[in-house]
């Protein structure tokens, strides 16, 4: 933690240093609108406070949001509307909570939280399974008393009461300074088993041996925040006690792991670092890996399509398509400067950044900027233009609801702003108007005129009789080709499915190529002509998912079988014999809210099911933890919870015939689970026992089941 006066000076230096940075081209996010959440009026104060801050021009800062289960948003932030506790016994910064019922477009103040004679700040909220809202914050008398409080609201933020203290350090005036010995910046969230965890910056170890000027600590509550367990070291530098990791923000990623973002100001100039953990409470020593282009006070978001987004105090938005392994900058940001920024997903194709924005006359107000981020994309050219496509060579025309290129040397047209996703499919109708080739570009970046001038992949058809796949880095490397009859004047449906480094290429629904390459994880999609030929494209569609498999290939990595006989044949995944055998996918496919579906066929009698949030699987019918939903030829649809035994959560009557395909779909929305058969809702229940794990499929008892078209999205 750094005192605000020092932070503002450091921020000014950062802005000067960063003013000459060159933005990356073609980021996926574009600004759409900005609203003001709170702008507390300036006033004439009695002088500076304990930190040298002028209360009258402070305004409002450090905004953090929470989406409630009813769809409303809460925003909590810090205000200064008094002369401070050194001049007013009841003074100090306070917390204010506002609510939006229209997805952030307008806001209404609903409550204030005060701790008279102390500075409240660093608010952050979670909603419990029973609907209660918890708010964590730090309460300080500088160099004298530091406390991390948890408040509870039972009416969605309208009123608050004290619940617990996470950690604290108390002394006489001045005794906890030089060096400071405080606790700051709590950030709560849920672990896979439903327990509540909190991370915070902790200076209390500075006088111990070994000594650390500041570390990131974690505590876990098993009773909904009423009490907190022992301290866990989450980020610290054993080789340098003055590293000072701070400002922790953490989230569960779509792969089921946890990422912790933090600043390191003592030895790394407040650069941002990140660490990952399989379970959210077991952390290796060290400060992690640096996140480029970010500086001071990070905030990381896991998006529903698997991407990560991160912001900080350096007016830059970055994304990761590989769970934090690499990052890339967006080329725009809504403000010229940022302070205590945070980022949230407000819609399928939208994020919002909350900022303590600078205001005329001094101080800050809380603003919220919305940005469009493409998660899906489709273009049928029926509007008669190619708006949003950037062309690099060739002659491109839109006519008759299609896109035609006369290409001399691999000329291309790409979508900008970028459609940059983790796992996705891209498809288009492709026609060669004369002999030559045409292709779809994907995960592509840094394009320029020239046949091979981009970084990424392409898959295409060639009238010489092939379907091909290659990667580009301003040159071409073949990843494979397959024989196929390709006639001029004929439309072919070309589709690429990219899943965790696996690239499958389909022509007219038939798998032609199946390769693995992890060279490129980010970039947009586009279309590419051949060499001295003409090609026409239509019906370009990009679909994101967490995992997808139509089982066209006999090689399907990542599946672990527990009993039974499993085989891939005829484009299906088949199970025979065994006592409810299961097949579980690794890596984890997980999110707070997602949909899992597959086609299921019972080849005879019995049952077949989908599994999710699976933990600790083993041999045996019920040997795992998690959930399952299935169909049974006895005429039922079932939903149950497993903990090495089975507990039924719901059932419904439904005719299930032998040897007939049924589409089984489970929609997970937080704790709510809805089971559909052929798009008809059959079961709707809630259960909060398991929040993390793998997906899988499960057979019945000594029967034969087939699965197809499995997708999680």
Image (cartoon, rainbow, N blue to C red):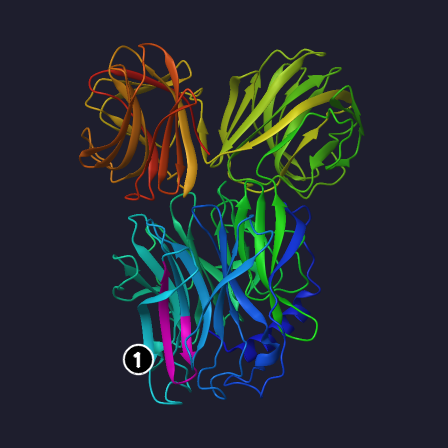
Residue range corresponding to the magenta coloring: 138-153
Q: Was residue 270 drawn as part of the magenta stretch in this picture?
A: no
Q: Was residue 142 drawn as part of the magenta stretch in this picture?
A: yes
Prevailing secondary structure class for the magenta stretch in the rendered image: strand
Q: Is residue 654 above or below residue 341?
A: above
Q: Position of residue 496 (x, y in %)?
A: 56, 27
Q: Position of residue 194 (x, y in %)?
A: 30, 50
Q: Residue at x 34, y 37 (%)?
A: 694
**Left or right side of 682 for 315:** right
For the residue pair 664 and 495, the one nearer the viewer reads as 664
For the residue pair 117 and 270, the one nearer the viewer reads as 117
Q: Residue at x 35, y 89 (%)?
A: 172
In which quadrant of the rendered view does residue 524 lie? top right
In which quadrant of the rendered view does residue 484 lie? top right
Residue at disc 1, secondary structure: loop
Q: Is residue 216 above or below residue 180?
A: above
Residue 282 in view in this figure: no
Q: Is residue 572 above or below residue 76?
A: above
For the residue pair 450 and 623, the one nearer the viewer reads as 623
What residue sits right under mark 1 in the picture? 208
Q: Residue at x 38, y 90 (%)?
A: 173
Residue 430 in view in this figure: yes
For the residue pair 41 and 493, the one nearer the viewer reads as 41
């Amino acid at each position: 933690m750094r005192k605000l006066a020092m932070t503002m000076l450091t921020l000014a230096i950062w802005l000067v240093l960063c003013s000459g940075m060159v933005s990356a081209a073609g980021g996926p996010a574009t600004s759409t609108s900005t609203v003001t959440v709170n702008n507390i009026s300036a006033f004439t104060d009695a002088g500076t406070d304990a930190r040298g801050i002028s209360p009258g021009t402070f305004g409002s800062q450090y905004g953090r949001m929470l989406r409630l289960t009813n769809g409303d948003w809460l925003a909590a932030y810090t205000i200064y509307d008094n002369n401070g506790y050194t001049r007013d016994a009841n003074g100090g910064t306070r917390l204010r909570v506002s609510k939006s019922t229209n997805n952030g477009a307008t806001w209404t103040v609903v409550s204030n939280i005060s701790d008279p004679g102390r500075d409240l700040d660093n608010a952050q909220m979670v909603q419990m399974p029973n609907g209660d809202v918890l708010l964590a914050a730090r309460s300080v008398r500088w160099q004298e008393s530091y406390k991390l409080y948890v408040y509870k609201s039972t009416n969605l933020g309208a009123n608050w009461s004290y619940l617990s203290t996470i950690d604290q350090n108390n002394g006489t005036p001045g005794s906890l300074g030089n060096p400071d010995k405080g606790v700051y910046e709590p950030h709560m969230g849920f672990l896979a088993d439903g327990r509540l965890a909190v991370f915070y910056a902790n200076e209390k170890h500075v006088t111990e041996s070994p000594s650390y000027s500041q570390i990131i600590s974690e505590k876990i509550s098993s009773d909904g925040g009423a009490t907190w367990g022992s301290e866990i070291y989450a980020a610290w530098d054993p080789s340098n006690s003055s590293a000072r990791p701070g400002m922790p923000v953490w989230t569960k990623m779509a792969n089921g792991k946890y990422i912790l973002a933090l600043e390191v100001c003592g030895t790394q100039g407040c650069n941002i670092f990140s660490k990952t953990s399989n379970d959210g409470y077991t952390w290796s020593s060290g400060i992690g890996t640096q996140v480029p282009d970010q500086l001071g006070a990070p905030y990381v978001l896991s998006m529903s399509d698997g991407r990560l987004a991160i912001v900080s105090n350096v007016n830059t938005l970055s994304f990761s398509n590989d769970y934090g392994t690499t990052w890339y900058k967006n080329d725009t940001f809504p403000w010229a400067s940022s302070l205590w920024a945070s980022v949230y997903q407000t819609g399928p194709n939208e994020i919002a950044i909350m900022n303590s924005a600078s205001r005329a006359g001094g101080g800050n107000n809380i603003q919220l900027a919305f940005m469009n981020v493409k998660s899906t994309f489709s273009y049928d050219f029926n509007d008669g233009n190619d708006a949003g496509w950037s062309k690099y060579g060739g002659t491109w025309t839109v006519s008759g609801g299609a896109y035609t290129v006369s290409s001399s040397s691999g000329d291309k047209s790409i979508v900008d702003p970028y459609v940059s996703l983790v796992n996705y499919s891209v498809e288009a109708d492709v026609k060669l108007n004369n002999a030559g080739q045409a292709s779809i570009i994907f995960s592509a970046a840094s394009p320029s005129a020239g046949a091979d001038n981009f970084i990424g992949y392409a898959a295409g058809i060639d009238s010489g009789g092939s379907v091909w796949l290659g990667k580009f880095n301003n040159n071409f490397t073949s990843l494979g080709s397959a024989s196929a009859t390709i006639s001029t004047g004929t439309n072919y449906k070309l589709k690429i499915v990219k899943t965790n480094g696996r690239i499958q290429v389909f022509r007219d629904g038939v798998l032609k190529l199946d390769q693995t390459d992890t060279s490129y994880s980010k970039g947009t999609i586009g279309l590419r002509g051949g060499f001295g030929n003409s090609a026409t494209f239509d019906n370009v569609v990009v679909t994101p998912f967490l995992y997808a498999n139509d089982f066209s290939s006999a090689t399907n990595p990542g599946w672990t079988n527990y009993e039974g006989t499993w085989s891939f044949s005829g484009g299906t995944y088949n199970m025979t014999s065994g006592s409810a055998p299961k097949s579980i996918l690794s890596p984890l496919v997980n999110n707070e809210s997602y949909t899992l579906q597959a086609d299921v066929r019972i080849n005879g009698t019995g049952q077949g099911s989908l599994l999710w949030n699976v933990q600790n699987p083993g041999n045996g019918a019920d040997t795992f933890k998690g959930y399952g939903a299935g169909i049974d030829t006895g005429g039922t649809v079932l939903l149950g919870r497993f903990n090495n035994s089975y507990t039924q959560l719901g059932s419904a009557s439904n005719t299930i015939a032998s040897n007939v395909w049924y589409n089984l779909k489970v929609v997970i929305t937080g704790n709510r689970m809805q089971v559909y058969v052929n798009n008809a809702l059959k079961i709707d229940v809630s259960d909060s026992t398991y929040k993390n794990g793998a997906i899988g499929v499960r057979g019945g008892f000594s029967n034969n089941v087939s699965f197809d078209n499995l997708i999680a999205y």
